Image (cartoon, rainbow, N blue to C red):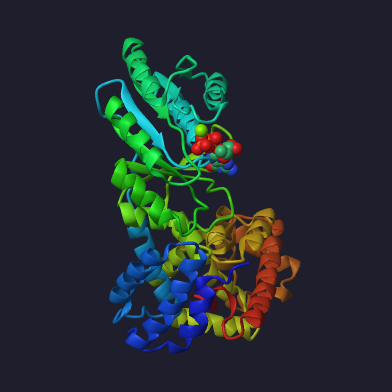
Amino acid sequence: MFESLQDRLGSILNGLTGRGALSDGDVAAALREVRRALLEADVSLEVVRSFTDRVREKAVGAQIVKSIKPGQMVVKIVHDELVATLGSDQVAIDLNAPAPVTIMMVGLQGSGKTTTTGKIAKRLTERQKKRVLMASLDTRRPAAQEQLRVLGEQTGVATLPIIAGQGPVEIASRASQAAKLGGYDVLILDTAGRTHIDEPLMQEMAEIKSATRPHEILLVADSLTGQDAVNLARSFDKRVGISGLVLTRVDGDGRGGAALSMRAVTGKPIKLIGTGEKMDALEEFHPGRIADRILGMGDIVSLVEKAAENIDAEQAAAMAKKMQSGKFDLDDLAAQIGQMQKLGGMGGVMGMMPGMAKMKDQIAAAGMDDKLLKRQLAIISSMTKWERANPDQLKHSRKKRIAAGSGTDAADINKLLKMHRQMADMMKAMGGKGGKGAGIMGKL
Ligand code: GDP
Ligand code: MG
C-alpha cells in the first residue's frame, strides 16, 4: 500500500494549525512530498517539475481556512491544480463534420486500439444511432484484421471486407470509399502499432492521415505507461497531430500518472477511458477521480470543501472534546445528525473519509439512512431535557409518551437509543485511534 499524500502532508504540516497563512518553508516541505507522490504515481519528471512550480505559486501565502489543517489545505491546492491540468471539461468525440466522419486510432502495439475501436463503434451505434464502419489497417500482425472482424460480429457493427495483400494506405483509401458509397456516418480506422515509437510507424501514420483526412485522431495509451508517456504523447502529437487521448486499462492498479503526463505535454483532452476488456467497458473521463487516484486518498477534498462551508469550527471542537470524554448525550446526537445532514447524510460523511468505507456499509446494513435520521431528530425533539441527558434511564411509560409526541412507536425509540449507543462507542474508538482527534468532527 502507498502512504497517501494526505497522511504524509499531515505529519509535516498539521502542527501549524492556528497560523494564518502557509509560509515558504511550509510549502517547500510539503512540495517535497507532493513531488514524491507524483513520481510514485508514475507522472513524468518534467511534468512533476512544472506542476510543483505552479502549486508553489498558489500555495505560498494561501490563507489556512479555520478548522482545516494545513496539510489538508495543501492537498486541496494540489488536487485542484491536478484537476485543472487534467482538464476540467468533458470533451466528447467530435462528429461535427460531413459524413463519413473519420476517426483514426493510433498508438503502440497492445495499447488497446482494436478493443477501443470496437467499444467506440458500439457506443456510437447504440447511443447515438450512428451507422458505423470499422476497418483494420493492421497488416503487420497476422490475425489483426480478423480480430476486428470478430469484434464487429459481436457488437453488430459493420467491418470492411478483408482483402489479402493490400497495404495499410491502400486499405485506408478503400475504407473511405466504402464508407462514402455505403452511406456510413462514421468510419473508424484501426491502425497497426509497434512495440516502440519509430520512424516507419510515424511515416505510416502520416500517410494514412493524408489519404483519409481524419476528423479525429485519437492516441490510445495504456494508463500504466510510466516515464515513457511524455515521449509517446509528444511524438505522436508532433508527427501525426492528435485531437485527443484515450486511456486504457484504467481498471488496472496504476495510479493515473500517465494521464497527467500526456495531457500536460500535449494539451489534448482525454476523451474516454477504457475500464475493462468487455465492449461496454468505456467511460467518460472524470479528472477528479484520476486526481484522487494520483493523490491516493479518499475524497477528503470535498469533505474539506463542505466543512469549510458548513461547519462552525468552535462547535466542532467542543463536540470533539465531549465525544472524547465519553459524554455524548442525545442533545449531542441531535447536533451531530444536523451536521451530518448538511454534509450529505451519514453515508456521505463516511464515504468521504479514507478507510471508512466499511463502516459506511455497516451503517447501511443497520438501516440508518437519511429518512431515519430525520425521524430520529423528531424523536429527540419530543424529549425533555432530562431525557435527552439520560438516554439509558428511559422507562417504558416515557418512551410511550415520546413516541406519541413524535408520531413514532416504541420500536423507533429503541432503535434511536441503540444508534446513540453505537455512535458513542464508535466515537470513543475513533478518538482513541486518532490520538488528538476524536470522532467525525475531530477528523476535520
Ligand atoms: P492493440 O494492439 O492496440 O490493438 O491492442 P488490443 O485492442 O488488441 O488490446 C490488447 C489487450 O489489451 C487485449 O487483451 C485487450 O482485451 C486488452 N485491453 C484493451 N483495453 C483494455 C482495458 O481498458 N482494460 C483491460 N483490462 N484490458 C484491456
Ligand atoms: Mg490492434
Q: Is 144 on the left or on the right of 364, as rendered?
A: left
Provide residue 414's location: percent of width, then percent of height. Answer: 71, 63
Determine which quarter of the picture holds residue 387: bottom right
Quadrant, the N terminus: bottom right
Q: Could you tell me which residue is drawn at 46 percent across and 31 percent down?
A: 117
Which residue appears farthest toward the right when viewing the image?
396
User: Is 139 drawn above or below residue 414 in the view shown?
Assistant: above
Q: Is residue 277 visible?
A: no
Q: Is residue 220 shown above or below 341? A: above
Residue 43 can be seen, yes or no: yes
Query: How many discs appear?
Result: 0
383 or 67, nearer to the observer: 67
Give x and y (percent) for residue 256. Answer: 48, 56
Query: Which residue lies at the image location 40% right of the left edge and 65% below the top edge?
Result: 79
Query: From this viewpoint, which residue is outermost toward the top?
Result: 181
What residue do we see at 55% from left, 66% from top? 353
> Is residue 199 found left or right of 210 in the rendered image?
right
Residue 69, x across and y down, in percent: 44, 80
Residue 365: name its quadrant: bottom right
Q: Residue 125, position in %: x, y?
A: 43, 23
- Nearer to us in this view, 444 or 163: 163
